[in-house]
Image: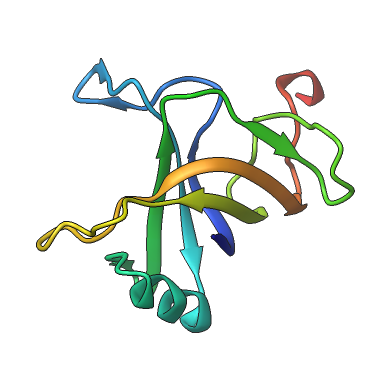
Amino acid sequence: MVTEGIAAFVNLTDHEEYRGKSTGNYTIVVTVDEDEAAKLEAAGVKLKFYKGSAQRKFKTQYDFTVVDVDGEPTSKRIPYGSKVRIQWNTDKTPHPEYGASTYLQKVRVVELAEGGGDDEDF
């Protein structure tokens, strides 16, 4: 499955931390529009809302690729506000309370947010 949205919280270079401990997962939270939200909900995926906008976290423990709009490998450092397309898969049976899991497979950076880049640009 593929979902397009705006990168909100990105932990793709290092594992996400929760309460000072590693979760063992690379994660990206994406803010999605109403159409994408409807597609996710139809697939059994539960969404969270922040300031009126639907968001979903995608995660993986495994190696994955990040490519640019032309399909060329690019940095896993994706700044807040970048437009991304997430390729993901899910469990066969959604959890009755938490919904379907969203497992990250690949990220395509469609449009890099201004000020985006590696620390070398500092």
- Considering the image in quadrants, where does the C terminus appear? top right
Q: Can I make out residue 52 in this image?
A: no
Q: Nearer the viewer, residue 58 or 99?
A: 99
Q: Is residue 12 above or below residue 52?
A: above
Q: Residue at x 10, y 61 (%)?
A: 97
Residue 24: give x, y in percent of width and height.
34, 20
Question: In the orientation shown, which residue stands out farthest toward the left?
Answer: 97
- Considering the image in quadrants, where does the N terminus appear? bottom right
Q: Residue at x 22, y 61 (%)?
A: 99
Q: From the viewer's perspective, is 59 left or right of 10?
A: left
Q: Residue at x 41, y 39 (%)?
A: 59
**Quarter of the view holding residue 81:** bottom right
Q: From the viewer's perspective, is 105 left or right of 95?
A: right
Q: Is residue 73 above or below residue 2?
A: above
Question: In the orientation shown, which residue stands out farthest toward the front?
Answer: 92
**Quarter of the view holding residue 79:** top right
Q: Can I make out residue 120 in this image?
A: yes
Residue 107: give x, y in percent of width and height.
64, 44
Q: Residue at x 65, y 30 (%)?
A: 76
Q: Nearer the viewer, residue 24 or 102?
A: 102
Q: Which color scheme is applied?
A: rainbow
Q: Is residue 32 above or below residue 86?
A: below
Q: From the viewer's perspective, is 96 left or right of 100?
A: left
Residue 112: give x, y in percent of width and height.
75, 49
Q: Is residue 4 above or below residue 118?
A: below
Q: Nearer the viewer, residue 19 or 57?
A: 57
